[in-house]
Amino acid sequence: MTWTRSLHVDPAAAVPLWSQIEDGVRRLVASGTLAGGDSVPSVRDLARDLRVNPATVSKAYQSLTDAGVLEVRRGDGTYVSTRAPSLSRGQRSRALREAALRFASVAATFGVGRDEALDELRAAWGELTRGRKGEPS
Amino acid sequence: MNAGASAVPLACEHLSIRYGRTRVLEDVSFTVPPGCVYALLGRNGAGKSSLVRCLIGQQRAGSGRAVLFGRDAWRDRAALMARVGLVPEEPDAPPELSPSRLLALTGRLYARWDEGATRERLRRFAIPMETPFARLSKGQKGAVQLALALGHAPELLILDDPTLGLDVVARDQVFREVIGELADRGATVLITTHDLAAIEGIADRVGMLRDGRLVLDESLEAVKERYALPLERIFADVTSPSAGGVP
Amino acid sequence: MSERVAVRALLAIAAREVSERVGLLGLAVVVAVVPFLAPWLGIGDRPLLGVLLGVVMVFSAAVLTGSSVIARDLAEGRLGYLFSRPVPWWSIWGGKMLAAFVLTFVAGAIVLAPSAAVGDWRLPAGGWWAQIGVPGLIAVIGIVNVLAVGYRARSLWFAADLAMAGGLVWLAAHTFRGLRDLAVDASHIDYASLAIWTIALAVMLAGAAQMAQGRADIARSHRVMAITVWAVLAPAVCAYAAWGTWVGRAAPSNLRLALSAWSAPKGSWIVVTGRARWPRPESLSAALLVDPSTGRFLRLGPAFSALHPEFTADATRMAWVSNPFGRTPRLAIGDLAQATPALHDVPLPIPPGPVTGFALSPDGRYAAVAQPALATVFALGSAQAAATAATGQDRLSSIAFDDHDRAHLLNPRQAPLSPGRLDIAVIDPGARSAATTGHIDTRGNPSETWAPGAVTVAVVHRPDLRPSLTLHDGTTGALLGTLVPEGGAGRIFATFLRDGRLAVVTSGRSVTLRLFSAQGIESWSLEVAPMFSLARATEAAPGILAVELSLLGRGSRSDTVLVDANAGRVIRTETGLRPAAASWFAWRSQTLPDDGSLFIDDRGALVRLDIATGARQVLLGGS
């Protein structure tokens, strides 16, 4: 899978590896590189490609499956989920709020103002949607 | 009581090794639970290879003992080696034999042996099958020893400084193979090394040796969380001669 | 871990070792051809060359394989390859040892088979293989394995090993020499086989122990091997030494058969030589000084010596030369008058070299020793010679002391078989001088017997060819008479009685005993037996002559005819008995006749005979 090369994991970073993998897959799904219905590599293969413990990949996949980003089809493998994640409104708000808080904290600790932070947010959104087809920007 | 099935794959109990007056290891105790990848870190000459030889019943410790799958490693070595695969630091295969003849010889030393899978591994590593072992490169030798250590599908895999003298490509090859074993069969792995970059993504638990003592023995996540430093730095601090100990 | 897999592993390991050394077998093929090229190589003895090459090949193969199958892998850190597999230690050890044996055996067979096929030599019998061949091969391979590991371990303990080995070798050799001196057949194949098997066991156990306990650690391996080897060999060699000591400490009751015996002039002391009984080795020959009345005894050492002990006239002391034909003969004195008699060495002031004759003066003051070049007379106990005389030749010499403590002996001037002259040398220790006082003409190969006090000397000339017997004055050599002319007898034996009379036994068509006066006048002649027999005589009791008729010529079955020397009449014949003093082992030297009426019966028992009644009392021996 060529897109696995764009999954950069840094074992030395403070962020846990499974989290890095999860975030990476999410980014790929969000940017449209991974479309709904695409298969993702097996735990074994991804672990070999990334040179990480399969348990780490397994944990990331589990988390993504729980979040509805990936779905497991019995006997067939793991695929990107075709449906939108079926989170309740409340769950979605909470997850978004957590991600937003993380972003805001990082920005604040760098001494970045709200406007600069919002500019960065827009730019990131633009990057993600560049590859997507037929999505409102 | 089926001690073998449920017992911990590797337990080191108060192991001490002395060569004459020199204390190589002093009261080292640690456990490797099933499915765990344990990285034992230490500077060169810190006693890692002596420890490995005691763990696989080739050397008798001065005091303490090594226990594999609930059985004493020295006493029950022959039975235990059916479940253990070892890749030594120094290649020790008969130098005049070619990989194909080594395959034949080693296969006869085991009750269970997957010749096809081993041959496939050697092909994957692009090993010339008829070249005498002595004439292979260091990386190729390591790959052959690894293939021969995996042929009997061991539950416990011990790699003694597997990346020493290997280039990046060879190193990657080795670890990809190990990861495959982990994924396929949930093997337990003990890796001794001084090369942190190699194991950082793979190890779940890490132990650090300094002057023959085990000064750290924790899960990798816990260590990184506690120190909030790159492992490299932690290792340097903990194992430097002037360090006072674990902070 | 199933046995089947372990055995399969053993064979796989052996196969690898063999295939690695296939070149050795190729070399064997080349060597096998060499004997057949012998003519072109200018070597005449093809069979010998074939056997020699075969032995060299076997030995070299054993050394090469034995020193490398285990030691090399161990030293180069490659045994770990096998120890990290589920094979038991005995698979590894067994496989490598098997390879060593197979390679050695096959290499040897390749070299030796063509020669054997062509008939140049024959395979030794099965017994040899079991006793020497197989254990020897095992021992060589095992020894080389132990040495190689010890050497490669580079430990200081190796020096200790060598010291231990040296010590045990010395102890074993010392024991062996002692046993050999006692005529024990110490190098008999049974003993040699036992030794080889013991060594093979020790080194094989050491190899096994190394694999089981030393494993891949060479330093530990060396220690384990050393402990095992010495734990087997040290007790074995000590047991051998203890056995050797015990064997040598034979007592009179341990003698199975007496070979010869002499009694002291007075009292009940007897010198006995004899062979031991089981459980001692039957070949053991010991000499003992025994007092049968009290059971006290002294050990005199090995039995075989042509120089028998000399008693003083009062029987208070006895002198004995031990190891006369060795490089350092020793003179021992036994003090018999003490409560506990003991032997002690006294100085022997002679040049180094063998002793060919010995005599003690009857009063015990002086001793005379003859050697190939020199005769020495010295005061007993003195470290200095009193007087010496040159002797002519390397021959066993009879020496006799006269009443003035002067030693008389005969010196030939020519080669042994040639006719010529014998000089009479008289050595006077009191005057510290020696002189030639006369000479005797001889037809050659003279054999002399001195009368008590050296008054006269009887000489048998050419006992090998038409012997003759002449009697001469003991100082001037003047011919007193030709008692048996040339051609008068097939064999002649002469012995003096204590009063100076001469008894002569001649064997020809019959056995005849003749008695001559001290001056050589015949008193009487008696036919003792009507046919030829080897015969000797001795004065068994004052005035009683015992004539031994040896029926088989080897002293194993004899009869003795007792003769009254004064009357010239046969008293009676004792069957199955022979005089103890006149044995084959003590025939040369005799100055004082035996007084003990000692005889040896056909079963080898030492017997005291009551001449009057014919009662026999067994003193010892006689299984």
Image (cartoon, coloured by chain):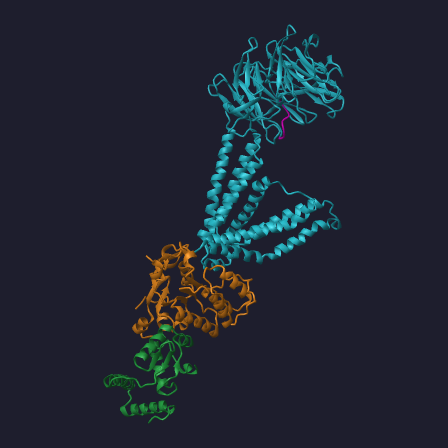
Residue B181, can we see it?
A: yes
Q: Could you tell whether C565 is left or right of A54 in the image?
A: right
The colour one sees for chain A in the rendered image is green
Residue reaching furthest to the front? A75
The residue that appears at 42% across and 77% down in the rendered structure is: A49
Q: Could you tell whether C457 is left or right of B195 in the image?
A: right
Q: Position of residue B172 (x, y in %)?
A: 45, 73
Q: In the rendered image of this protein, does residue C335 appear above or below residue C183? A: above
Q: Is residue B212 inside the magenta stretch?
A: no
Q: Could you tell whether C548 is left or right of B242 in the image?
A: right
Task: Say which chain is orange.
Answer: B
Of residue C424 and residue C466, the one placed in the foreground of this image is C466
Q: In the rendered image of this protein, does residue C347 appear above or below residue C475? A: below
Which of the image's four quarters has the N terminus of chain C?
bottom left
Magenta range is C352-358
Residue reaching furthest to the left? A90
Q: Position of residue C330 (x, y in %)?
A: 57, 27
Q: Position of residue C62 (x, y in %)?
A: 58, 50
